[in-house]
Image (cartoon, helix red, strand yellow):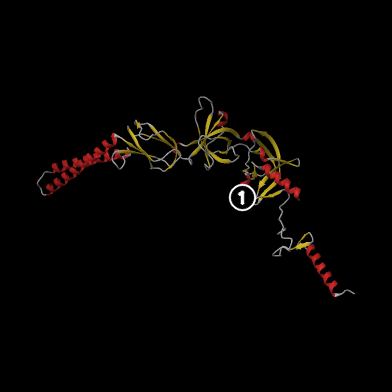
Amino acid sequence: MIDNTNKTKLIAGAAIAALVLSGGGVLLGRTVFSPTTATAPTGEAEYGEEEEHGPEGFIAMEAARLEAAGIVTEKVSAGGLAAEIIAQGVVATTSEGEAVLTARADGAIVRITQHLGDSVRAGETIALLESREAATLVADRSAAAARASAARSAFAREKRLFDEKVTARQDLEAAEQALAQAEAELRRARSAASASKLAGDGRTLAITSPITGRLTRVDARLGAYVLAGADLFHISDPNRLQVNASVLPADARRVSVGDTAVIELADGETRTATVHSITPALDAQSKTATLLLTPQGAAQLTAGQGVRVRVRPSGQPSDGRMTLPEEAVQTVEGKNMVFVRGPKGFQATEVVIGERSGGRIEIMSGLPTGTVVATKGAFLLKAELGKGEAEH
């Protein structure tokens, strides 16, 4: 006969076995930890909640960790190696994104307000030039204003006398004509002063920036006497950049305005670009044509920087192939794998590869167009995958 104490133990053991078999808890050593329990039993706090595992070959990775690891991704697009045009390019400032400030007259530089590397706004004064032309402009403007004032007074007097029938109409018309000429001369004098950027002090000319950007070159020196037309400052807008890519004439004929391209940076990052125009003539020395590409976003691009460009002409027949950087394909247990980006991490995916050229590799099958995969740093995911399998 079973006493009450043993009966209680048997009931408790049966309850634990039922809980484990039903999946309601996780057996940790000799302790059962249920997901519905608020806290772990004493001495088992290091286990925490049950760790969730994705499918086989899945590597969980948040965006912050992805950025910290320096892993770069790329969207796969259709087109094999034969469909791409590989070219070397140089980042340059567009015609609207660069300005050269020159001296508008002979004179001495008496003030410089901005220096090399400083940011400037459109219309901002960069320097002041003391010049005789400034005095001449002021004198012309003052004389024109005085003549216009005298002409207005004369016209008002003739108008009053004509209304009183003291003077003839021809006298009134002569006064009116003189007033029109005086006002036209005043407008000319004011326009000349404005075009020369006459400063408020009446003795200096202001040198102002026509665009917003940064000072990339400064040839002006305080106190130096310069001649009209001398280069003083160069300003460049870092947000108005283009890429000039040199291609062979045969390749240039395959490209059309509006075709897409990919700009590859030295750190593995890429930028999407569009063909803006194609030069109609070849370079006299290299005998190559130049493609002008407009990048989407100028981040990490600097004027004068060398880049590699991959242009994909439109209208090319698609054979189902795609290309990726060679480092995107990693060998895992004898299989060619790429790591596909998902909302919570990367999934190792087997692919069939083709030819290699210029650091690129063809993907024959295994990936749909538009898939985002890891390129630079893919070997880190391979190592993480091997670590996870070893721990498992």
Residue 381 relative to residue 308: left or right = right
The answer to which image quadrant residue 155 occupies is: top left
Q: In the image, what residue occupies the spot 67% across and 46% down?
A: 340
- Looking at the image, the residue that sits furthest to the left is 166
Rendered view: 51 above or below 171: below
Residue indicated by mark 1: 64
Q: Nearer the viewer, residue 110 or 138?
A: 110
Q: In the image, what residue occupies the spot 41% across and 35% down?
A: 233
Rendered view: 217 above or below 1: above
Rendered view: 336 above or below 19: above
* Image quadrant where one finds the N terminus: bottom right
The answer to which image quadrant residue 226 occupies is: top left
Rendered view: 42 above or below 257: below
Q: In the image, what residue occupies the spot 11% across and 49% down?
A: 164
Amino acid type, mark 1: Ala
- Looking at the image, the residue that sits furthest to the right is 1
The answer to which image quadrant residue 6 occupies is: bottom right
Q: In the image, what residue occupies the spot 12% across and 47% down?
A: 161
Estimate the x, y position of residue 35 in percent, counting from the top left: 72, 62
Estimate the x, y position of residue 102 in percent, counting from the top left: 38, 34
Estimate the x, y position of residue 244 in percent, counting from the top left: 52, 34
Q: Is residue 184 visible?
A: no
